[in-house]
Amino acid sequence: MTAGTLYLVGTPIGNLDDVTARARATLGSVELIAAEDTRRTGLLLSRLGIAHCRLLSLFEGNEAARVPEVVAALQEGTNVALVSDAGMPGVSDPGYRLVAACVEAGIPVDVVPGPSAVLAALVISGLPTDRFAFEGFLPRSGRARTERVREIAVDPRTIVLFESARRALQTLRDLSAVAGQGRRAALVRELTKLHQEVLRGTLAEIEAEVEARVELKGEVVVVLEGAAGVKTGTPEEAVRIAKDLVEGGAKKREASRLASERTGVPARQIYQSLLPPS
């Protein structure tokens, strides 16, 4: 028996007109669609005029249990499309485990490219696009978050982050405290939708704009300028950055090294400023 094919199908991130002809055709031809949210995918299929297709939920909470079921269906010759709520499945969404299992089992996997919030935010940000890194969602709290922010602050590449609207302000504050208030950034929300908005400027400027609002709504992507594009800072700024790092749990020598990379001020000079008066 010939195995079916798993199709990774990109779906619109907001504007339905962004759906590709190939995505529409693929979703209309497969026997099974594995969807992060069957209700949301059902609405999409209805708007595309696609009916009588079996939907199977596959989200973070049940992905491990669902993978064997989908693989079995594929091995029996069923063609399956995998979709997330929006954008490309597997990018900060379920999908990786299923793809890995299909590769391991020798099941054909194909991709039907579509809209991507990562790339859309990157190119509209106005920041360098030649080298970038996608970091997904930051850890919500604790040492894991502190360490990730420290790593991002000294990365020379443009950084793209996903964030919820209610946590966006805190993320801007955390980035500003370590990367410096003058680091350029962009906050992009509601991509491709009616109320799409791009806030560009320094972290301090964007933070002030968001703080002044009663409520921030919609899907949010934060794009941060890489460390290599930042001008050298003053000794005072370097010491402030190092102290923030120490308060976040970093050792004084490590904090001095990171602050030096950020500002160009010698690490030894910064370290001496962190020591208590003799």
Image (tube, rainbow, N blue to C red):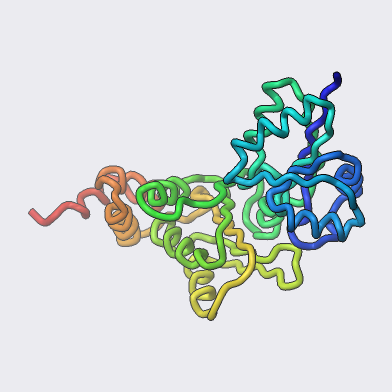
Q: Quadrant of residue 76 in the image?
A: top right
Left or right of residue 213: residue 232 = left
- Residue, x 73% and y 52% (percent of image)? 38
> Split into 4 quadrants, where in the image is the N terminus?
top right
- Residue, x 21% and y 54% (percent of image)? 273
Q: Residue furthest left?
A: 278
- Residue, x 47% and y 48% (percent of image)? 152
Q: Position of residue 108 (x, y in %)?
A: 79, 26
Q: Compared to 225, does 203 lie above or below?
A: below
Closest to the observer, 272 or 22: 22
Q: Position of residue 12 (x, y in %)?
A: 78, 55
Left or right of residue 153: residue 192 = right
Closest to the observer, 232 or 3: 3
- Residue, x 86% and y 21% (percent of image)? 2
| Res. 88 in view | no
Left or right of residue 214: residue 43 = right
Q: Position of residue 186 (x, y in %)?
A: 59, 62
Left or right of residue 234: residue 113 = right
Q: Position of residue 120 (x, y in %)?
A: 71, 55
Q: Compared to 270, does 79 lie above or below?
A: above
Closest to the observer, 130 or 174: 174
| Res. 31 in view | yes
Task: Count all numbered tags in the image, as a single digit.
Answer: 0
